[in-house]
Amino acid sequence: METALVNFVLMMGQRGCDRTWMKGRSVVCLIAMLLCGVASAQLRYSISEEVEEGTVVGNVAKDLGLEKSTLKGRKYRIVTSAIDPLFNVDQNDGILYARRKIDREEVCERSSTCTINLKTVLENPLEVHYVAIEVVDLNDHSPTFPEKETTLEIFESVLPGVRIPLQPARDPDSGPFSLQQYKLSSNDHFRLEVKDSGDDGKIPVLIVQKSLDRETAGSHTLKLTAMDGGKPPKSGTMNILVSVLDVNDNGPIFSKDVYTVMLHENAPVDTTVIQVNATDLDDGPNGDVVYSFSNGVNRKFFKLFDINQKTGEIIVKGLIDYEERDRYEIEIQASDKGLPPMATQKSVIIKIVDVNDDAPDIEVTSFSSSIPEDSRPGTTVALISVNDLDSGVNGKVICSVIDDVPFVLSPSLQDKMYSLVTKTTLDREKQSQYIITVVAKDGGQPSLSSENTISVTVSDVNDNRPEFSLSPYTFYVTEGNSPGASVFSVKASDRDENDNARISYHIIRDGNEDNKVTSFLNINTDNGEILALKSFDFETLKTFQFQVVASDSGTPSLSNNVTVNVFILDQNDNAPVILYPLSSNGSTKGVEEIPRNVNAGHLVTKVRAYDADIGYNGWLLFSLQEVTDHSLFALDRYTGQIRTLRSFTETDDDEHKLLILVKDNGNFSLSATATVIVKLVEPKEAFAASDVKSAAKVTDEDSNVIFYLMITLGAVSVLFLVSIIVLIAMQCSKSTDYTSKYLPETNYDGTLCHSIQYRSGEKRYIHANTLVLPDRRCTSEEVRKTILFLGSYAIILIRNKKLILQNNLLNRNRQEA
C-alpha cells in the first residue's frame, strides 16, 4: 500500500509540476505538493553537450540539504520511463552524473533551448525534488547542402530579374552556431539574395541581373558557400552549373505547296504512297523536323495510313477499298523539337484507282466430315456454293480442287453450285485424313481467287491382318529357368485402329508328339508375353518350335501366325564324371604298379573324366589335392597325366596315395575327385605284370580304335552327303537357313570337351539372350565354303583318331621296352 501510494503521489505531482513548470508557476506546484503531504524542491543545472560518460552534473544531496547517510535507506532515485536514461544519481553521495554521451541535436532537435527535466524521489518520508538540466549547444556541425553539385538550365531569352530559388543548406546546431549567411562567387550575370523563412531557415535565391547569350557563353559555373556563426565559423559549399539553352525562333517549311498522288486500291501494306519534305533553319533539336498527322485528321484514316516521323514517308497501313472511298485528303504536320516546338501544316491529296478487288466467296452448304474407306468412287462428301460480288468478267468464277487428292468437284445443274465427290477408292492405312483445298478464281485482270479448306476423315474398315515384328522369331533361353516366369514375348501390330487393331494372342496346340512342349507354355493374350510352366534342361531338350496366332477384334476378325524357334542354352549344372580310374565296385579309385627303377618323366597313369556340359562349363582342369610326397609326382592340369618328377630311392615308401581334383570352368564350378594308389615293385615283378596287361590292353585298344575310326568315317561321310543335299534344297527354295551345329571337340589326350555354336552364313549377332540371324539368300560361294568346311572337319577328325592310334602304339612300345 505504501509503494502504491508513493507511485500515485509521484504521478500526480509529476503532472502538476510539468504543467506549472511550463507556465512558470513553481509556487503553485509547491503548494499543491504540500497539500498532498509531499515535500518538494526545484534545482537547475547546466551542462555542455558531448561531455564524456560519468561527467558530474551536480551534487543534488548537498544542494537540497539532504543527509548522505540516509539516501540509500530512503531509496533515493530518479523516476523515469526511459529505457536508456541520460542521467543517474549515486545513492551513496547524492551526485548526479551523465550515464552516456549527450548529443543536443538528438535530444532537442530544432529547439532554441534544450532543458531536460528530472524527478528524484526519497521515501520515508516521501519527498519529490525536480531537477532541470540545460544542455548547452556547441558548434560541432558544419552547414551542409543536400547535393555537392547542381545543374540549372536557363533559356537565353530569360529577362533580367528572374529569381531562381536554390536548395538551402542545413546546420543542426542552434542559436549563434546555426546557419547565418550565404556567399556567391563573383559573376557578372548573377547575384545572390537570401530569404528568411522563419522556422525553415534562410533560403538562397539566384537572381539574373544581366541578359544571357548562349552563343557567347553556353554555361556558367558558380560556387555557393553557407557559413554558421561560430568562431571560427564553419562552412559548406555547393557547385552550381548554369546551362544556357537555345531559343527556337524558326519553324519548318515544306518543299511543295501542294502534294497530290494516285494510289491503286488493295495496295499491299507498307506500300509507300508519297514522301513529304520540310526543313528548319534552326540548329540542334530546334532544327530537327518530326512528321505526323495533324489533330484535324479523321481518326479512321489512322487505320489506313501511317507516316514515318523521321523521313516523312506516308505508307499503307490497312486495306484501301475504292468502293468505300475514292479520295483522301490528309493534313500533314511538320514540327521541330524546340521548346516550345514550332509546327507547319500541309495537305496531301490521295486519289484511289479502282481495280478488281472483290474475290470470290466459297461457302460449304452441306458437309460429311467422315467417310468409310470402302466407299465407292462418286460418293458425295460436300455441297459447295461460290459467289463473287463483282460483275461482268470479274464476276465469272472457275472452281477447282488443288493438290493430288482422291476427290473432285462435279458441277451441278444450279449455277455456281458444285458437289465434292470421291474420285478413287480410299485407304485409311495410307492416309487417314485429307485436307481438301477448294480454289475459286474470277476472270478479272489481274485475276482474284479465294480458298476454302475441308477436312475429311476416312473411317476405318477391318481390312488388315495383324503383322508380327519378326518372322520367324528366334529366342535363346538359358536352361534352369524359373517355372511360371516370362521367358520371351512376341509382338504384332495392326494397321487398322480401335477394335480392328486390338490384338489377342494364343498358341497353336495341335496335339502332335513333336509339339508336346507347347503344353508347358502359356501366353498372355493381351501383350504376347510367353511364360514357361516348367524349367528347361539343355541335356534333355536343346531346341523346339511352335506357332503363335495373333487375331484382331474386328468384324469379321482377321488373324496371322508366326513360327517361334527356341534354343536352350547350357548352364553349368553337371559335375565332371570320372572315367578312369574306376573300380569294379563303382568307386573312383585305382591302383598302379610301376618299377622302382623308372626314370624322371615316366608316365604313371592318366586320369580321364567327362562333363555333360559344353563350352567352358565342360572344360575340365586337373589338380593334385593330396599326395604323399610332392617331390615324386606331377599332374598335368589339362591332360590329367601323372608322371614321375625324379628317380625313386631306397628310402622312398613302397606305396603312395594321390587324390586328384577334377573341376570344370563354369561361373560356379563343379568338381569330382579320384584316388590313385601308386605301388613301387621290383623290375621283374613289374615286367611280368605289364606283359599280361599290355597284351590284353593292346588287343582291346587296337580293336577299339579301328572300330571308332570306322564309325567316325561313316558318320562324317553321311553328314557330308546330307549337308550337300540340304544346301542344294535351300538354294533352290531361296529360304533362310537357320541351322545349329553341335561340334564335339576331342583333344589328343582323350579328355572330352564340348562346345556349341549357332551359325548362319558368315556372321553371328547376339542381342541380350536372343540370337538374331540375318535373313538373306545362300549364295553359291557360301555353299562352296560350307562344303570345304565340312571336308576339312572330316579330315581333322580322321587325323585326330590317327594320332590317338599312334600314341597308343608308342605307349605300348615304351612299356614293352
Image (cartoon, helix red, strand yellow):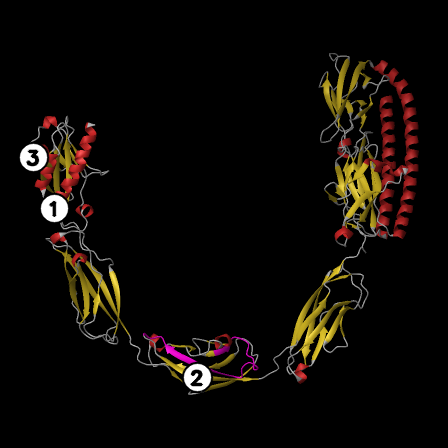
Q: Could you tell me the amino acid type at mark 3? A: Asp
Residue placed under numbered mark 2 in the picture: 347
Q: Nearer the viewer, mark 2 or mark 1?
A: 1
Q: What's the distance in space between the residues labelled 2 and 3, CA to CA?
A: 97 Å
In the displayed structure, does residue 682 sit left or right of residue 184? Answer: right
Residue placed under numbered mark 3 in the picture: 63
Residue 386 or residue 290, whichever sits in front: 386
Say what secondary structure mark 3 lies in.
helix
Q: Quadrant of the N terminus?
A: top left
Residue placed under numbered mark 1 in the picture: 23
Residue 98 visible? The answer is: no
Q: Is residue 770 above or below residue 166?
A: above
The numbered mark, 1 or 3, whose residue comes first in the sequence reads: 1
The numbered mark, 2 or 3, whose residue comes first in the sequence reads: 3
> What is the crowding at mark 1: few (fewer than 14 residues within 10 Å), some, or many (at least 20)?
few
Residue 336: in magenta span: yes
Q: Quadrant of the C terminus?
A: top right
Percent across and percent down for residue 614 are 79, 33
Q: Could you tell me the amino acid type at mark 1? A: Lys
Residue 465 or residue 349, whichever sits in front: 349
Q: Which residues are magenta?
A: 314-339
Percent across and percent down for residue 800 are 85, 34
